[in-house]
Image (tube, rainbow, N blue to C red):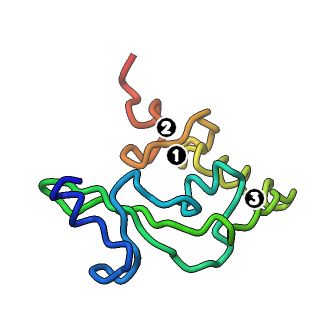
């Protein structure tokens, strides 16, 4: 194990307060939120069980928190009301505030309006 990975290896939590492992070296039974979601699970209110660190040279390390797989709960199913609320929110993101039409894409925050309204003189 290299010197940079040695700084990230703290299975007892003496240095960082929680068990810490180098990137891609998490123990079995501990996974990240993304890995839980890929399995159709969620943390379910459990506390963070550990973290993995990936050292970087010019900035602070990348951190991913770990959760226990045996304490994870299944993802809650999508309800019709939640589905309708998401559809309404996505429609609002696609609606141009200037011409009030559905642009068919998410309006970029940098423009604030649809492309034809932002650049009316372009061909």
Which badge, 1 or 2, is on the more N-terminal residue? Answer: 1
Q: Which residue is mark 1?
A: 98
- Where disc 3 sits, the SS reads helix
Q: Spatial distance from mark 3 to mark 2, Cα to Cα?
A: 23 Å
Q: Is residue 116 above or below residue 25?
A: above
- The part of the image, by quadrant, that contains residue 5 is bottom left
Residue 1: x, y in percent? 23, 53
Q: Nearer the viewer, mark 1 or mark 3?
A: 3
Q: Earlier in the sequence, mark 3 or mark 2?
A: 3
Left or right: where 27 falls relative to 52: right
- Callout 1: SS: loop
Query: Mark 3 packing: few (<14 Cα in 10 Å), some, or many (20+)?
Result: few
Answer whether labels 3 and 2 touch (C-beta < 8 Å). Answer: no
Say if mark 1 contacts mark 2, CB within 8 Å.
yes
Q: In the displayed image of the protein, which residue is found farthest to the left?
A: 58
The residue indicated by pointer 3 is: 85
Q: Residue at x 42, y 62 (%)?
A: 64
Q: CA distance from mark 1 to mark 2?
A: 8 Å
Nearer to the camera, 71 or 105: 71
Badge 1: residue crowd in 10 Å (few <14, some 14–19, many ≥20) = few
Q: Residue pushed farthest front?
A: 1
What is the number of the mark on residue 114? 2
20 versus 35 height, above or below: below
Q: Is residue 101 above or below residue 120?
A: below
Tell me the mark number nearer the camera, choosing from 3 and 2.
3
Question: From mark 1 to mark 3, how far is it between C-alphas?
Answer: 23 Å
Task: Give the percent coordinates (x, y) of residue 112.
Answer: 43, 48
Residue at 56 percent across and 41 percent down: it is 99
Which element carries disc 2, helix, strand or loop? loop
């Amino acid at each position: 194990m290299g010197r940079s990975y040695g700084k990230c290896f703290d299975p007892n939590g003496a240095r960082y307060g929680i068990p810490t492992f180098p990137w891609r070296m998490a123990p079995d039974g501990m996974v990240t939120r993304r890995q839980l979601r890929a399995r159709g699970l969620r943390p379910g209110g459990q506390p963070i069980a550990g973290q993995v660190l990936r050292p970087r040279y010019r900035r602070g390390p990348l951190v991913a928190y770990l959760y226990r797989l045996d304490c994870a709960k299944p993802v809650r199913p999508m309800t019709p009301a939640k589905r309708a609320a998401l559809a309404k929110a996505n429609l609002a993101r696609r609606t141009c505030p200037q011409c009030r039409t559905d642009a068919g894409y998410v309006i970029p925050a940098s423009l604030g309006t649809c492309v034809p309204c932002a650049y009316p003189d372009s061909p």
